[in-house]
Amino acid sequence: MPWVGPGIFSFGFSCCRHAFLGGHRFMNSVLITGASGFLGRHIPQSISETGSSVHVLGRTPWPGRADNVSFHRMDLLSPDTDTFETMSEIGADTLIHVAWCTEPGAYWTSIDNLRWMAASLQLVDSFLRGGGKRVIVVGTCAEYDWRYHTLIERETPLNPSTVYGHAKASLHKALASYAQAHGISFAWAHVFFSVRAVRETPTAVE
C-alpha cells in the first residue's frame, strides 16, 4: 500500500473542517449528502455550530441532533420529478457532497459508481441553479497511481486502476474544469485508508 506523503489532504475530521470552513464566507446555508455514513455523520454538527442552516439530503436521517439541521428525504440515485427541484428551492450557498457507493468488496467495480457520477452532476447542477456558490466533494486516494510508493498532493499522477477510481477522478476533473471556467469556489477532498480502518458498519455512505 502506498505511503501518504506530506501535503496530502487525507480526510481526518480536523482537515475536513478546515476545508469546509475555508469557504466560511459562503456558509449561511449548507446542503450535505451522506450525513448518515461513517464520514458524513460528523459534518452537520460541526457546520451547525458555526450558526449556519444545515440541510441534510438522503434516504436515511442524520443520526445526530441540532436545532438548525433539517432532513430532506430523497433518493439521489432514483430521483422523482421533484427531487432536484427541491434542492434548487432550498437555495443553499454551500454544497458538501459525501454520498457514494462504498459497499465493502463491491464498490471497486460496481455499476453504482457510474450512477453516482450522473447523480452527482445533477446534484451540482441543481445546487448552482438555486444560487449555490461553493462546492465541496469527497474524492478518494484510488484516483492516484498506486505504482508510486509515496502519494503527494499535486505531485503523484492521477491514474486510477478501478471503476471506482475512474468514476471519482472523472467527476473531479469535470467539476474542477467547470468551476474554474465559471468562477465557482470548489474543493475536492481525497479520502485515505486510515479512516476506513476504524469504520464501524459495512454499509454504503448515504
Image (tube, rainbow, N blue to C red):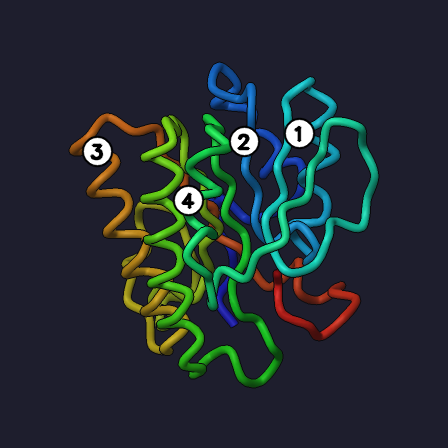
The C terminus, quarter of image = bottom right
Disc 4, SS:
helix
Disc 1, SS:
helix
Residue 83 drawn at (x, y percent): 47, 52
Q: Label 1 near label 4: C-beta < 8 Å? A: no
Counting other residues with Cα less than 10 Å from the Cα at mark 3, is it few (<14), some (14-19), or many (20 or more)?
Answer: few
Instruction: Say whether residue 146 is left or right of residue 170.
Output: right
Instruction: Say whether residue 68 is left or right of residue 125.
Output: right
Between discs 2 and 4, the one toward the N terminus: 2
Which dot marks residue 180?
Answer: 3
Residue 29 drawn at (x, y percent): 56, 25
Q: Nearer the viewer, mark 2 or mark 4?
A: 4
Residue 146, located in which quarter of the rendered image?
Answer: bottom left
> Residue most toward the top?
25
Q: Nearer the viewer, mark 4 or mark 3?
A: 4
Residue 200 drawn at (x, y percent): 79, 66
Decide which of 119, 20 is in the foreground and name it.
119
Q: According to the image, label 1 marks what residue?
A: 47
Which dot marks residue 20?
Answer: 2
Q: Label 3 near label 4: C-beta < 8 Å? A: no
Q: According to the image, label 4 marks what residue?
A: 85
